[in-house]
Amino acid sequence: MTTRTTTLPGLNVGQAATGSTKPMRRVKRRLPVQRLWPTWAIVATQFGILAVFVALWEMGADVGIVDPFFWSRPSLIWTTMIEFFSQGNAFVDIAYTFRSTILGFIIGTSAGALLGLSFWWSRNYALIMQPYIICLESIPKLALAPLIILVFGMGLASKVAIATALTLIVSTLTAYSGVQSVDKDQEKLFYSLGASRWQIFTKLVVPSCIPWIISILRVNIGLALTGSIVGEFVASQHGLGRTILYAGSTYEISLVWVAVLVLSALSVVMYAGVTWLERILRKGVVR
């Protein structure tokens, strides 16, 4: 003999078994929303972490946990920084590094973007050049720094050349990726409307690739700064890289820290400037 169990509509098995007619309440689950701190709180926390780190560093140097000969101490670094800006060639070195970085950034990004965009004109040309571009990308450009110094000399041109070498290939590959992502259907539409290749290039290809080129700006400014510093390490008469190399060779660790801190501040300023430029360019692309 078999028994048949009938479940009433709107009730689950547990409700039918217990005879309960109360409807089940659905629990609404909400995604957790993380509240962002105000700007002043974030900045205060950042400065607080820095202050604690500096205080622990100074205390460690006082009690002997941190060796001042190898790591220096914040109070001595502060005194050296005052002397560096008041008696040394601080502003000359900063301007030298800044100028070589900006020039390498502008030349490398512009030339690389134009080279990558030029691959749209001919697939054969792109296929021929692609192995050379990949080969240049795989070569460690920093290892070529001594050769570049020999060719361009110890002046500003060699630092700009190294910064350009680091940013050129990255910009080329990024622009070429943008060219490959251009919608083929839109190209056919332009052709069907009687547009010339130059019109398609200027009205479709370039606007489509601009977001790709903009996305590489912040990476390139860091690469350009790296190239400039490496060039100053190899051979230079000015620059923050030369200051770091000189201070390290004479065991002036506090001066090394001063140059590193100034270099960090310079990189933050340039990064903020490139971020602002990227925001302006993105607004122009959206419009």
Image (cartoon, grey):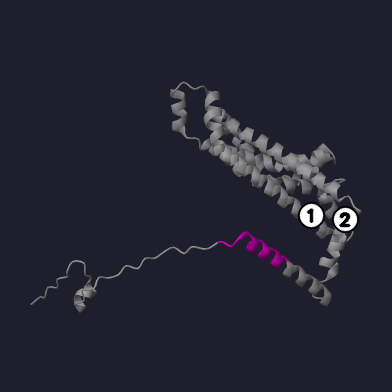
The residue at the point 77 percent across, 71 percent down is 55
Can residue 135 be seen in the rendering of this structure? no
Quarter-of-image position of residue 162:
top right
Quadrant position of the C terminus in the picture:
top right
- Residue matched to label 1: 262
Quadrant position of the N terminus in the picture:
bottom left
> Crowding near pointer 2: few (<14 within 10 Å), some, many (20+)?
some
Vertical relation: 136 (above or below) 255 = above
- Residue matched to label 2: 84
- Left or right placement of residue 164 versus residue 283 in this view: right
Q: Amino acid at mark 1?
A: Val
Quarter-of-image position of residue 73:
bottom right
- The location of residue 214, given as percent across then percent down, is 61, 41
Q: Amino acid at mark 2?
A: Phe
Nearer-the-camera pick, 151 or 112? 112
Q: Give the mark, 1 or 2, whose residue is nearer the N terminus.
A: 2
Residue ranking furthest to the bottom: 18
- Left or right placement of residue 152 versus residue 186 in this view: right
Nearer-the-camera pick, 27 or 212? 27
Inspect the magenta stretch and tell me whether residue 42 lies in it. yes
Q: Which residues are magenta?
A: 36-50
Disc 1 versus disc 2: distance between alpha carbons? 11 Å
Inspect the magenta stretch and tell me whether residue 126 lies in it. no
- The location of residue 127, given as percent across then percent down, is 57, 33
> Crowding near pointer 1: few (<14 within 10 Å), some, many (20+)?
some
Nearer-the-camera pick, 89 or 151? 89
Residues tagged 1 and 2 counted as in contact (Cβ below 8 A):
yes
Helix, strand or loop at label 1? It is: helix
The residue at the point 83 percent across, 55 percent down is 244
The residue at the point 82 percent across, 72 percent down is 61
Can residue 192 be seen in the rendering of this structure? yes
Helix, strand or loop at label 2? It is: helix
